[in-house]
Image (spheres, rainbow, N blue to C red):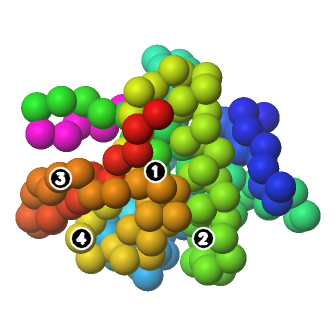
Amino acid sequence: MILETERLYLREMEQSDFGSLCKILQDEDTMYAYEGAFSDTEVHEWLDRQIARYKKWGFGLWAVVLKETNEMIGQCGLTMQPWKENEVLEIGYLFERAHWHKGYATEAARACKKYAFEELNAMEVCSIIRDTNIASQNVAARNEMTIKDRWIKHYRGVDMPHYRYVVER
């Protein structure tokens, strides 16, 4: 276990989490900000990328497990992400749709912010969010982040305006 909150614990994902990850990454509604659901191959690549991040950085997107049921309900964690000409420390989060609007993303994101400041000694942390993703923008705002700048990312052949929400130590 990496982090624990009142209702959740966060741990490194492993290959056995593939099925739980598919519930998130293969849901069209959940993945609207990514221009659609992922294939099995894309889910495997996503999972492999997180495991590689754990080895390289000591962090990545972690499995979010609901204490009450011991079920993986989402992922939240820290990653290094490209932003313009830089690489920035980002809090990312994606949850299974059945667990939206219950405060889990905010709870997990706050724990990740604390981890970034206290364990990694980061001076700032951000969340990079597509301009149409209001729910994630609301989570960032509840995590005391504000919009610092905007950039258009190119993904799956689509120009996607994104905001970078930032909070400083």
Nearest-to-viewer mark from 2 and 4: 4
Name which residue lies at 66% across and 70% down.
Answer: 103
Q: Relative to 149, does residue 80 appear above or below in the rendering?
A: above
Q: Is residue 115 above or below residue 23?
A: above
Instruction: Name which of mark 1 and mark 4 comes first in the sequence.
Output: 1
Give residue 93's position: percent from left, percent from top: 50, 56
In this view of the protein, which residue sits in the foreground, 163 or 73?
Answer: 163
Q: Decide which of tag 2 and tag 4 comes sooner along the chain.
A: 2
Q: Residue at x 41, y 27 (%)?
A: 123
- Left of 18 or right of it: where is 68? right
Q: Nearer the viewer, mark 2 or mark 1?
A: 1
Residue ID for mark 3: 149
Residue carrying label 2: 96
Residue 145 in picture, x, y percent from top left: 41, 54
| Viewer-closest of 18 and 60 | 60
Q: In the rendered structure, which segment of residues is drawn in magenta?
A: 80-84
Q: Are marks 2 and 1 in contact (CB under 8 Å)?
A: no
Q: Amino acid at mark 4?
A: Asp
Label 3 or label 1, whichever comes before in sequence order: 1
Q: Amino acid at mark 3?
A: Asp
Q: Give the spatial CA distance, label 2 vs label 1.
A: 14 Å
Q: Is residue 37 left or right of residue 97?
A: left
Residue 159's quadrant in the figure? bottom left
Residue topped by disc 4: 131
Q: Which residue is mark 1?
A: 92
Mostly what secondary structure, the magenta segment?
strand
Q: CA distance from mark 3 to mark 1?
A: 17 Å
